[in-house]
């Protein structure tokens, strides 16, 4: 990236965009140390580990439960495992982030009902459903609805992960080698994006009283899916939504630069954008990069990321007690679109689909530039004093995050982040 574009992008990242008039949960957004503990697989084998929950700096626990354990037959539900974890968390005055494993955790009866399979051999041997398969989507969204009917008013659960038929059922990426291949199965970015939109709509409807999130990775070697899913989630869910990165290390910010941009953009607009440490700082300190897990935590804080999932053995490692107990993050409040009181500069709608309207009540000649999420200039236009509003055609721009920079004839500068979503 050219240096001037990089500097401009960093500058623009400090600006925020309009939040939506959507009812907020009755509880604060999750923040601080949450345990990335083991999955809940049975009674007595739960995510809420007593030794972890007893730590005063632990604010909550990520509870992971597999779909096939909760819906053993079509429309037959067993909520015992989640109910048990809620009770355990309450006994320690902790909160829960809830993640339901899809992908490799899809019940066998879904395949018996006709869902298409993808058999994975790399990076592991397992089976998932074709993510855009209509049978799978119908059964999965049906389960999401039932899950919401049961837990949408529960205040011990503060954050709900939106998951799909992916490589491990929690993170966004697909298996690398499958039978049939993704190409033969009919993969396209458009199909993958459409399936995610269906799932996002289902979670948003099922959990109107909770904060929502999902992990971001490249999908089939492309960043298009992640960028589009993020834009759609923000435009649909609004201020109840924040992105998440389950790959967090210092090293991986260069491995996943596009997703790193998503996480930083999300953190600039809400206080519960999250990360999950990719490794244990106790057993794999060298996998993080210089400074190990403590430096990874500080990197998150520096980026305004205030929700941190840390492995259970790091929470139980007394060497990290001081680090985790004293970690703090600057919590921001919701803000509205930046305006100049003198010129009343506005850009709307935001999110937008085909057109942007630029408004100056005290009209000046100005140059308008639009940059994409990596700082590349995609539009450069000059507007005169004749009208108080101008309409900009953005129909040819792909969905995603953009930054608008307006420079007036007397060198005043106005910046705004926008989202294009269709």
Image: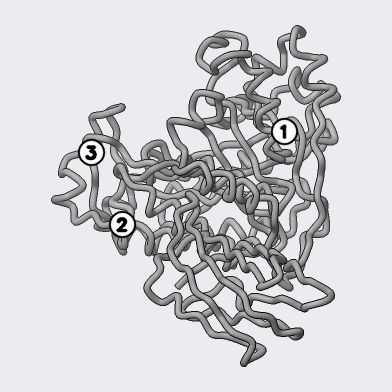
Q: Quadrant of residue 65?
A: top right
Q: Is residue 175 visible?
A: yes
Q: Is residue 204 visible?
A: no
Q: Earlier in the sequence, mark 3 or mark 2?
A: 3
Q: Is residue 85 left or right of residue 127?
A: right
Query: Element at badge 2?
Result: helix
Residue 146 higher or lower than 374, as above or below: below
The residue at which mark 2 appears reads as 189
10 Å neighbourhood of mark 3: few (<14), some, or many (≥20)? many
Q: Residue at x 67, y 89 (%)?
A: 388
The residue at which mark 3 appears reads as 119
Q: Earlier in the sequence, mark 1 or mark 3?
A: 3
Q: Position of residue 308 (x, y in %)?
A: 68, 33
- Residues at marks 1 and 3, CA–CA distance in whole angstroms: 39 Å
Name the residue nearer the viewer: 42 or 263: 263
Q: Nearer the viewer, mark 2 or mark 1?
A: 1
Q: Is residue 67 left or right of residue 183?
A: right
Q: Residue at x 18, y 52 (%)?
A: 185
Q: Position of residue 22 (x, y in %)?
A: 72, 70
10 Å neighbourhood of mark 2: few (<14), some, or many (≥20)? some
Q: Position of residue 191 (x, y in %)?
A: 30, 61
Name the residue nearer the viewer: 273 or 379: 379
The residue at which mark 1 appears reads as 301
Q: Nearer the viewer, mark 3 or mark 2?
A: 2
Residue 99 higher or lower than 74, as above or below: above
Query: Element at badge 3?
Result: strand
- Residues at marks 2 and 1, CA–CA distance in whole angstroms: 32 Å
Q: Quadrant of residue 248?
A: top right
Name the residue nearer the viewer: 300 or 198: 300
């Amino acid at each position: 990236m050219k240096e001037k574009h990089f500097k401009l992008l960093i500058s623009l990242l400090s600006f925020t965009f309009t939040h939506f008039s959507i009812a907020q949960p009755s509880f604060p957004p999750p923040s601080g140390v949450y345990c990335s503990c083991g999955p809940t697989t049975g009674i007595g084998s739960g995510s809420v580990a007593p030794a972890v929950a007893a730590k005063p700096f632990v604010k909550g626990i990520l509870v992971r439960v597999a779909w096939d354990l909760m819906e053993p037959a079509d429309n037959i539900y067993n909520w015992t495992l989640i109910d048990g974890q809620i009770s355990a968390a309450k006994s320690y005055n902790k909160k829960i982030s809830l993640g339901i494993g899809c992908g490799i955790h899809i019940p066998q009866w879904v395949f018996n009902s006709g869902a298409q399979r993808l058999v994975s051999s790399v990076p592991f041997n397992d089976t998932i459903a074709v993510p855009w398969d209509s049978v799978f989507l119908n059964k999965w969204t049906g389960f999401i609805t039932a899950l919401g009917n049961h837990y949408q008013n529960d205040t011990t659960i503060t954050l709900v992960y939106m998951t799909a038929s992916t490589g491990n059922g929690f993170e966004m990426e697909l298996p690398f080698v499958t039978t049939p291949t993704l190409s033969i199965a009919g993969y396209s970015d458009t199909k993958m994006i459409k399936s995610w939109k269906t799932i996002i709509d289902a979670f948003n409807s099922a959990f109107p009283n909770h904060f929502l999130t999902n992990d971001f990775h490249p999908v089939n070697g492309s960043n298009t899916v992640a960028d589009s899913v993020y834009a759609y989630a923000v435009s649909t869910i609004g201020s109840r939504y924040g992105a998440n990165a389950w790959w967090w290390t210092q090293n991986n910010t260069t491995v996943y630069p596009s997703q790193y941009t998503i996480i930083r953009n999300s953190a600039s607009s809400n206080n519960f954008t999250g990360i999950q440490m990719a490794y244990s700082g106790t057993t794999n300190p060298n996998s993080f990069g210089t400074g190990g897990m403590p430096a990874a935590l500080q990197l998150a804080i520096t980026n305004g990321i205030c929700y941190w999932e840390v492995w259970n053995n790091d929470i139980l490692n007394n060497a990290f007690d001081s680090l985790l107990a004293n970690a703090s993050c600057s919590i921001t409040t919701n803000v509205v679109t930046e305006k100049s009181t003198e010129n009343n500069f506005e850009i709307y709608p935001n999110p937008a689909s085909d057109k942007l309207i630029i408004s100056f009540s005290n009209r000046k000649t100005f140059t308008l530039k639009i940059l994409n999420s990596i700082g590349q200039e995609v539009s450069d236009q000059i507007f005169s004093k004749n009208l108080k509003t101008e309409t900009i055609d953005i129909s040819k721009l792909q969905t995603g995050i953009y930054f608008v920079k307006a420079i007036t004839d007397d060198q005043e500068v106005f910046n705004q982040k926008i989202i294009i979503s269709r």
